Amino acid sequence: INGCQDKEIVETYDDAVCEAYLACEAGATVEFCSHTGGHLWPVSDDGSGEYDATDETWAFFREHPMP
């Protein structure tokens, strides 16, 4: 996918499945998640370990700052 060399990394949550491809062209990564929660923003603030879109989005932008 998009010139990525590594195999995909799959993380499964109660309400989502996330896939990531690392070592892509120009140092990029490809990450995407599929949610089963309809049209609600997925958030887990109860410590249950469910997928939290806010935390995952922030983690992505911290790891990939703009040049």
Image: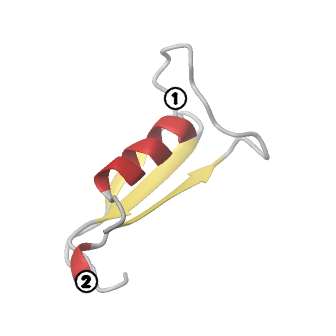
Mark 2: which secondary structure? helix
Badge 1 or badge 2: first in the primary sequence:
2
* Above or below, 25 relative to 59: below
Q: Judge the density around disc 1: few (<14), some (14-19), many (≥20) Cα neighbours within 10 Å.
A: some
Classify mark 1: helix, strand or loop. loop
Which residue position is annotated with label 2?
Answer: 25
**Vertical relation: 46 (above or below) 34:** above
Q: Is residue 56 above or below residue 48?
A: below
Give the residue at the far front of this rendering.
67
Residue 61 percent coordinates (x, y): 40, 53
Q: Quadrant of residue 8?
A: bottom left
Front-most of residues 60 and 47? 60
- Judging from the image, the colouring scheme is secondary structure
- The N terminus appears in which quarter of the rendering? bottom left
Instruction: Name the residue tied to disc 1.
Output: 50
Judged left or right of residue 51, residue 29 is left
Total number of numbered discs in the rendering? 2
Q: Is residue 12 left or right of residue 29?
A: right
Q: Residue at x 53, y 34 (%)?
A: 52
